[in-house]
Amino acid sequence: MTTNQLLIGLGLTVTLAVGSQVLASRLRIPALIVLLPVGFTAGALTSDVNPSKLLGPVFQPMVSLAVAVILYDAGLGLELRKLKGHTRRVVWRLIAIGVPVTMALATCTALLLLGMPEQSALMIGAILVVSGPTVVGPLLAFVRPSERVQRVLAWEGSLIDPVGAILGAVVFHGIVSGPHTHVFAAQLGQFLASIAIGVAGGAVGVVLLVVLLRVLRLGEVLGTTAQLAAVIAVAAACDVLRDDTGLIAAIIMGLAVTNMKGFDISARRPFFETLIQLIIGLLFISISATVTPASIRHLILPTLGLVAVLVLVARPLVAWAATLRTDLNRGERGFVGWMAPRGIIAAATASTFAPALSAQHVGGAQKILPVTFLVIVLTVTLYSLTAVPVARRLGVTRPARTRPLLVGGDPWVIELGTALQSAGLPVLMWAGAETQRGQIRDAGLELATGELLAAAIEGALLEGITMVLLLTSEDDFNALASTILRDNVDGPVYRLRPRQPGHGVVAPFTGGEALFGAELTGDAVIQRYRSGARIMSRRGCDPLPAAAEVLFVIRADGRLAPVTDKSRPAHQDEDTEVVLAR
């Protein structure tokens, strides 16, 4: 290809990847629903978006390393202390039972419905055991199921990917090596050897990260690039020794960083999040562009049958076995049995091994990539359209009700917490002084642990908290805390308006949005409270008392809307208003 063709192809691929994700965000749907058909259409209409032509033999190694980076990032979000008891048992069972059961059913279905020879059917079965964080994560964020269900599915998706990739590599080498290697013991030995190489590579990678992040103590920017370089280097070295073992090394490195003491890794990682989004978009556009309309024309109906077996037979059976004799309730078990979309690992494995099997003249190999593409499209579309109503029907969705964290222990703050709690909100409070903590307990309010803010400052997400209200009498503390916490909470951060907005430790325009009207600073609230004003709640249909200030509006569905300079919630009769009045 000429330089101009390469530039056009690369530019178009990046544009389609990012543009598809932007469109999906505006439509409020998972990005894969847009990425896959866009890539397929681009591949059908133009030859410019063709990774084999653009990158040649470099494409497959780049895919493997890109997936390693994705799994490292997934590992960073998996805290072992949260995986305990029955939740841990379910995750291990989903992998230990799910892999062989899904592989067996997918292989048999491919033999019967797709008419694939034994070797290609076995390859399809190995490819389709995976799920993946790149698909499960966005769907869970969209559905917002209960924390335990979300944890089970997130862990399963992250851990089953490298296992599935290794399994695919072992099956591939077993096929191309000839019939004399088709012995179970030999195949099991190959699988265990791959696991051992991945674990050893992960251990080396952890030592490397310890040197980079704990000994050298690199800054945020250089530390991030050093992590990226370490993951790519270790994954590449492992893959040289044995295919796809770098994926195991990568996720072990991510798990170690997030679970070992001494690593200063934020819960929110803007650079990694941006990089992962770009990688996912590029991979799905590129891989789906290699699938031609002619290759899927006669496979649509048989693949629908394969998807039906995976969705209606394999997954419910695996989920039933995995959750047997655990404390998951019926709804949680049902939702685990209804969530197993296929994602980037299935696509990457198929795009890696299918062309190689075709080159070896293995019968049916030409069907592997288009069938995998169709399974990904169909499962992602199905689960995207049904996950929310199914979760609601099974009663596993989180309520829309706001769960605010109130930081501060002054009397008026405790009274505010009581008013919000009496209106039905699950209030959590935190204060530093022991006397204030005692007053919070005496008021019957839930008190956060003393380490809560310290953990958040170190980068831990405040799980379950959907809004933070910084209400201490120290303006600088509020400003600093809002700057730190805004990236560690799943919702907005607000702070009291400072006495002197023109100067302070933190610039007035940084951190969380200031609460209440322009005249109602923190000092003003305290002075009014000392003068006899009180925090009270009232129905929105009742007349507002004279000289009263509306502070918050609680919607009928439990959403909390603060009053600010920029936003004054529109009045509705079914609202509950929290006011400061005499």
Image (cartoon, helix red, strand yellow):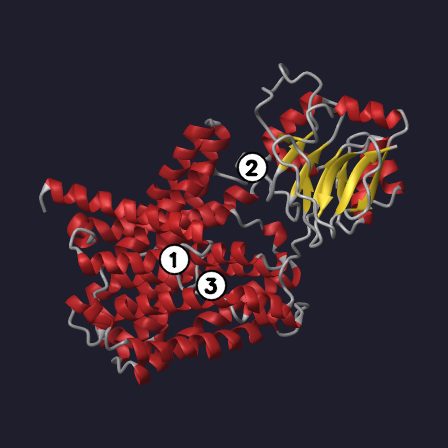
Residue under numbered circle 3: 384
Q: Against 21, is 293 above or below?
A: below
Q: Quadrant of residue 391?
A: bottom right
Please state the horizontal and vertical placement of residue 476, each as a whole percent of the image: 67, 21
Between the C-alphas of marks 3 and 1, the distance is 10 Å
Label 3 with label 1: CB-CB less than 8 Å: yes
Visible residue check, residue 346: yes
Q: Against 146, is 8 above or below?
A: above
> What residue is rendered at 43% in x and 29% in y?
221
Element marked by disc 1: helix
Q: Against 355, is 256 above or below?
A: above
Please state the horizontal and vertical placement of residue 531, each as a whole percent of the image: 89, 24
User: Mark 1 Cα within 10 Å, few/some/many (few <14, many 20+)?
Assistant: many
Which label sits on residue 487? Answer: 2
Which of label 3 and label 2 is nearer to you?
A: 3
Please state the horizontal and vertical placement of residue 4, each as a whole percent of the image: 12, 41
